[in-house]
Amino acid sequence: MKVLITGAAGFVGSHLVDAYLSDGCDVLGIDNFITGDISNLRDARENPRFAFRELDVTKMDERSLADIAESFGTPDLILHFASPASPIDYAQRPLETMRVNSLGTENCCQAALAWGARLLLASTSECYGDPLVHPQPESYWGNVNPVGPRSCYDESKRYAEAFVTTFTNVHGIDSRIIRIFNTYGPRMRVDDGRVVPNFVGQALRGEPLTVYGGGMQTRSFCYVSDLVDGIRACAASDETRGRIVNLGNPEERTIRQFAEIVCEIAGVPLDVDDATPMPVDDPGRRCPDISRAKALLGWSPKVDIRTGLRATLLDFSARLTVTTP
């Protein structure tokens, strides 16, 4: 099978590259390095079944598709994972975020139509906004501020879902959509700005952990290998055609509890700075209902939080040692 992955040099994208190569697939990675890092593809680039093209998916046109088909072959599966995903990134690049989730998604749909390929869109739990329903099932429409500071990401992802759904209804492509809840693991950027890199980096540097608004807001954390298993299962399943599937860990905990676990694994005293107010429109609760993933895919996460954090801490520790003078 030939697999094209946009956002291939990113955190999740690079793990998908490795997984599909391990499955024996030919993989073409696409990235323009707005937030991706070529070092994430270090192992993949040693594999003769991996090809890479530096390309902005918002500019992928008929000529690009012809070049890809000629040099790589016609992809059987497109995984659209290109997009800034952290609040820091999309605050700094709001228009790029909106373009990749609108124009980039349209281009991936057109590619799927031209090649007869299956398409999987990576969407987000941010489509639920600050939810009024808990936990969040795929049927929930969400509670999103369309003009707030996070709207460039939240609403462009909601648009991407609408576009894929409409394009599928009109043209009959084989598509499915996943909504990803908080995921963590090796290769996250140290300066990513999300809670896991923040806490892990601060713990390793011996700094107080920045806990916004007292830390009573909740999240659920899914280790990256579990997410990748869910993505592969969803992409391979005929049962998910034309459907949306939540992928995440339903174990809900407060941010304060999560800070305690990080400090425990890092072997440092609990030290938090909880004086910083909550960011605007930051959700108070976030937890997936994964009943559909269980029923259709037989999938649920397996890696417990402490095991996943140990692996993440080891990865961050090695990279901080290298980058710190």
Image (cartoon, rainbow, N blue to C red):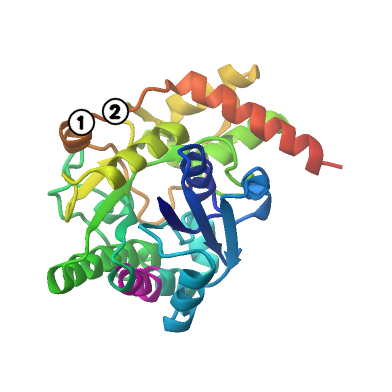
Nearest the viewer among 322 and 237 is 237
Quickly name the residue at label 2. Answer: 300
**Which residue type does callout 1 highlight?**
Lys
Q: Which residues are magenta?
A: 101-112
Quickly name the residue at label 1. Answer: 294
Nearest the viewer among 204 and 60 is 60
Q: Is residue 34 visible?
A: no
Picture residue at 53% right of the left edge, 58% below the top: 29
Q: Is residue 294 visible?
A: yes
| Residue 41 placement (x, y as % from top left) | 63, 49
| Residue 226 on the magenta span | no
Q: Secondary structure at mark 1?
A: helix
From the viewer's perspective, tell me whether residue 42 is left or right of residue 158.
Answer: right
**Disc 2 to disc 1: CB gap under 8 Å:** yes
**Which residue type does callout 2 highlight?**
Ser
**Residue 298 position (above or below residue 41):** above
User: Which quarter of the rendered picture does the C terminus lie within?
Assistant: top right
